[in-house]
Image (cartoon, helix red, strand yellow):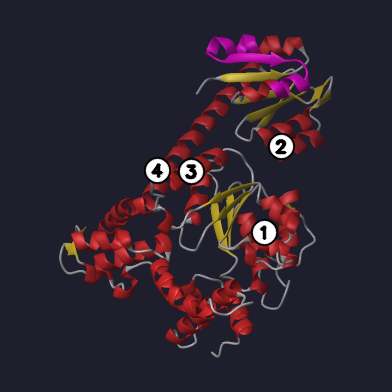
Amino acid sequence: MDKKILIIDDDESIIWVVKKALEPAGYKISSRTRLASGLRAAEDQPPVILLDLVLPDGNGLDGLRELRSSHPDTIVIMITANAMMESTITAMKEGAYDYLEKPFDIEELKLLADKAFKDLALQQELRELKKAAFETETPQMVGKSPKMLKVFKDIGRVASKDITVLITGESGTGKELVAKAIHLNSRRSTGPFVAINAASIPKDLLESELFGYKKGAFTGAARDKTGRIEAAHGGTLFLDEIGEMEQNLQAKLLRFLQEKEFSPLGSNDTIKADVRIIGATNRDLSEAVSQGRFREDLYYRFNVVQIKVPPLRERKEDVPLLIKSFLREAVEKLETGEKELSKETKVFLEKYDWPGNVRELENVIKRACVLSTGTIIEKKDLLIEEANSYSIKDFLEEKLKRYLKDMAKITNFNLYDTVLSEVEKALISIVLKETNGNQLKTARLLGINRNTLRTKIKEYKIKK
């Protein structure tokens, strides 16, 4: 790491002293005498900045806030002629690394500069260790198809920018892996990654899960609880299925995105949290906005950058790579012994349409590794029905061709809406029957939210 230090101070004698003290030790010192020019010089991202509290064109505390916002990895040390308690406390609360009082001791300056660069080196080492651990413990995204290469490029484009991201895609495509990759490659990588699925938590409990609560806030609140937002301080909060949030909670989330502060349930205290929010959905949020089910202002706040994860059927060339990855995981983590696929099994898997996407493929491979008796995985070990050996697209086209022969004779018939609703109604009815009316299992098999399933059952008047 280059030992560069930027001084923003209008006192030329202070600049001279700093250079005299630190340049012989290998530090590269640059200086600016005004706040505006100093902030422009900070665009070159020097690791350490010495910032005067009082400058001719501005307040050093305002400069500190701007630096912490635009260059959060930079260490800022405040310099003050009068270390008043109030200004010192404010500086430390706003993220200053430390402060020096004029006239400062040269040895103290040297020790503080050395300490700052040692801390920066430790942070860098921690990032690398965490990255190595992440790559070992967390399933990685695999792909060489054009659509996946675009996803990788999008991740690289947004990771370093501390902005809100919306990840879209069908269930099982790996939206959380995209969020984790963004976190890992951001300046927040040493902070926590906290995930919460809005569809898996009852709506009346979701607010308390996000914001936390104080003892006695409601019946059953026997002690204080830290919310997921506060737990993610300094890191990233991944909100999966944000389209399932109720509108009053959407309003509170919007306020947090704007103000970076919130109040736990049952408390009048305001808590600040430095958290990056990444949202995900398998629904069309723009349609939800037009229907009044999702706030337009929150949608635009999330939709600063959108990353669309393609379904597996649209990147079939990635299937062999994914199979290889899942086979290796099964050997390492499930201790199944070496496994390989027969030629017939490979052909079958590459032709299959994968309605459950990557998650379905992973489950099929790992299950087959566990259940197969030899080293070769045969087609029968996959436990996929023969009826699925050709795609859903082929199946529907075959059925629709027969249906259209009769329907073409009828005029003034709303074919589009009728076909879609009948297919959806039949699908839900069949799966409900297979699960003996268990709505939770049905929703999981269909890849939709339980509340969405209930709405459809009511809409189509399906008997449970």
Look at the numbered discs 4 and 3 and tell me whether their residues touch, using CB distance below 8 Å: no
Kindly identify which numbered label has been placed on residue 150.
Answer: 3
The residue under label 1 is 286
The residue under label 4 is 132
Kind of element beneath mark 2: helix
Q: Residue at x 60, y 34 (%)?
A: 73
* Residue 23 counted in the magenta span: yes
> What's the amino acid at mark 1?
Ser
Which is nearer the N-term, disc 3 or disc 1? 3
Q: CA distance from mark 2 to mark 4?
A: 32 Å
| Nearer-the-camera pick, 212 or 89 | 212
Where's residue 26, x and y in %? 53, 13
| Nearer-the-camera pick, 89 or 274 | 274
Which is nearer the N-term, disc 1 or disc 2? 2
Q: CA distance from mark 1 to mark 4?
A: 38 Å
The residue stretch that appears in magenta: 19-40
Kind of element beneath mark 3: helix
